[in-house]
Image: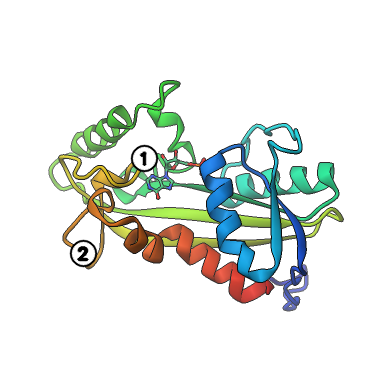
Amino acid sequence: MSDEFGQEQAIRKLGPGKLVIASHNPGKVREIGDLLAPFGIETVSAAALDLPEPEETGTTFIANAELKAMQAADLSGLPALADDSGLCVEALNGDPGIFSARWAGEAKDFGLAMRLVWDAIQAKGPDAGHDAHFVCALALAWPDGHVEVFEGRVDGTITWPPRGDKGFGYDPIFQPHGHAISFGEMEPEKKHAMSHRADAFAQMVAAVF
Ligand code: IMP
């Protein structure tokens, strides 16, 4: 991280103790808690502390992760970690991007969301490329307003029809570069070792512990 004069600033370290996971998704909270336990970090969820879920008004993954983490740190008086992730298709100028969850509608219908992605690529014409990447932004905020951010990604191509039922969200139409199967067909341990989330966490762990 650099300051307003372009000087490199030391990344703030995270000491042992309690950390709020600024998410109301129990699966995500458990997964992040497991990842951080070896570093002496005890996690508590935003839901357990009755913290409100802020509106995601940012225009980037980083901005949305930051606003979630900063609000949780401010309200709880503890350091807080938030993530924001999604699928970006190059031919669609990065869509669905930060709106990845919203493309699935109120019913969280990812069959529909995947179809919308495929149809949008087709609508671009026969020369439209299928390159895409998943992004995961992580923001770690402290109650004094300090925040560290990390962004991970994994590159691949959009395939049709959807394949596999092992993942979630857009996994069945995303085939990572260098692999012949979609994330939906991949064993979870294998996906978790190479995903955008793994990349972001590896960067964070290397920087803050
Ligand atoms: P959020 O970060 O919880 O807001 O999730 C954003 C949305 O991005 C999810 O609802 C999924 O649709 C999509 N997404 C994020 N990560 C993945 C992934 O690893 N596989 C499939 N879809 C994902």
The residue positioned farthest toward the top in the image shown: 106
Circle 1 residue: 169
Say above or below: 157 vs 198: above
Left or right: 194 with respect to 41?
A: left
Q: Earlier in the sequence, mark 1 or mark 2?
A: 1
Instruction: Tell me the SS state at disc 2.
Output: loop
| Label 2 within 8 A of ligand 1 by Cβ | no
Q: Residue 79, image x and y in percent? A: 77, 55
- State the residue in front, 51 or 38: 38
What mark, if any, has residue 160 been given in the picture? none
Left or right: 157 with respect to 38?
A: left
- Which quadrant is the C terminus positioned in? bottom right
Q: Residue 26, image x and y in percent? A: 56, 40
What's the residue type where badge 1 is placed? Gly
Circle 2 residue: 179
Whole-angstrom CA distance, mark 1 to mark 2, is 19 Å
The residue positioned farthest toward the left in the image shown: 126
Left or right: 198 with respect to 187?
A: right
Say above or below: 119 vs 162: above
For residue 124, what is the image quadrant?
top left
